[in-house]
Image (cartoon, helix red, strand yellow):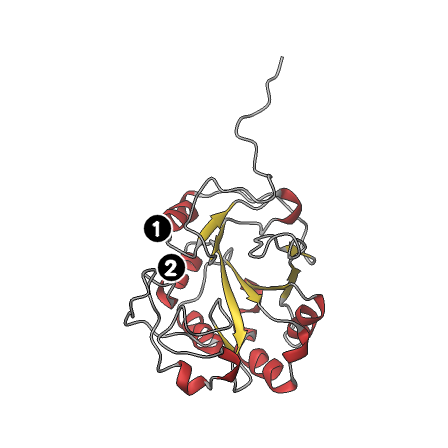
Amino acid sequence: LPFTGERILEGLRLGASVEVDLVRHADGGFAVLHDFSLDRDTTGSGLVKDTPAATLRQLNLRDAAGRPTPHRPMLFEDLCALLVETPPHPDALLQLDYKEDESVLDTRTVETFARATPPLARNMIVSSGSARAVALLTGAVPGLLRGFHEAVRQRQDGAVVLDQQRTALAAELRVAALHVMLGFAEVRQHVVEAPAAAAHLRPAVEIGRIAAHIKHAVARARPAQHPPLRP
């Protein structure tokens, strides 16, 4: 099944960290999609940047086998509206991974983003391979956390996010979030345990491009498996 709004809400309700990808569409807003092209993940064709919001809302998402599903692609404001209706757990974190650079962030796009975000800013962090893009988006929304992909040049689908506004702490697995991880295992989605130098502060559920593997590590870093021996 595709990663739908309902599944995102489930994870955030349990206090997990969930990543969604943002790609700019033709009307100066964001679609919650991983690819720049519509062909693989939706019943549409062409580039997201050339597709109006109304057209995006009429498409259907495809499953891992390429079959159309009843689920529609979401715009960023659609996702925010769902989260206002079903507020996330206070400890939940929604990572907004902006897939492009600052060159396409015009005034209209930033304003559209800023209108949808404020009620949920405390539960969100913006990440990107472009520090300037992160600054533009977070600068429009007071209280919105900033991050960037330090490893973006090393891993195409890097899951490392540095939070520049909170103390970096090791992520701690919690029972509730672990159930979310196991329940969300699917193609183009995987779960990581973030290293201590770049932790989300909670378990991460990421939309990636490989199947979930709960023991997957980032940059060979993982939490200690056993307490140290003592005399």
Q: Residue furthest top?
A: 231
Coordinates of residue 148 in the picture (x, y in percent) = 66, 60
Q: Residue flagged by tag 2: what amino acid is it? A: Glu
| Relative to 53, residue 178 above or below | above
Dot 2: few (<14), some (14–19), or many (≥20) neighbours within 10 Å? some
* Residue at 32% from the left image edge and 71% from the top image edge: 71
* Quarter that holds the N terminus: bottom left
Q: Helix, strand or loop at disc 2?
A: helix
The disc label shown at residue 94, or none = none
Q: Quadrant of residue 227?
A: top right
- Per the model, the C-alpha gap separating discs 2 and 1 is 10 Å
Q: Nearer the viewer, residue 111 or 100?
A: 100
Look at the numbered discs 2 and 1 and tell me whether their residues touch, using CB distance below 8 Å. yes
Coordinates of residue 159 in the picture (x, y in percent) = 56, 53
Q: Nearer the viewer, residue 212 or 110?
A: 212
Q: Helix, strand or loop at disc 1?
A: helix
Q: Quadrant of residue 178?
A: top left
Q: Residue flagged by tag 1: what amino acid is it? A: Gly
Q: Nearer the viewer, residue 87 or 81?
A: 81
How many numbered discs, if any? 2
* Quarter that holds the C terminus: top right
Dot 1: few (<14), some (14–19), or many (≥20) neighbours within 10 Å? few
* Residue at 52% from the left image edge and 85% from the top image edge: 26
The disc label shown at residue 10, or none = 2
Image side of residue 202 versus residue 38, left or right: right
| Relative to 212, residue 112 above or below | below
Image side of residue 74 versus residue 220, left or right: left
Image side of residue 225 versus residue 175, left or right: right
The disc label shown at residue 183, or none = 1
Mark sitting earlier along the chain (2/1): 2
Coordinates of residue 137 in the picture (x, y in percent) = 64, 74
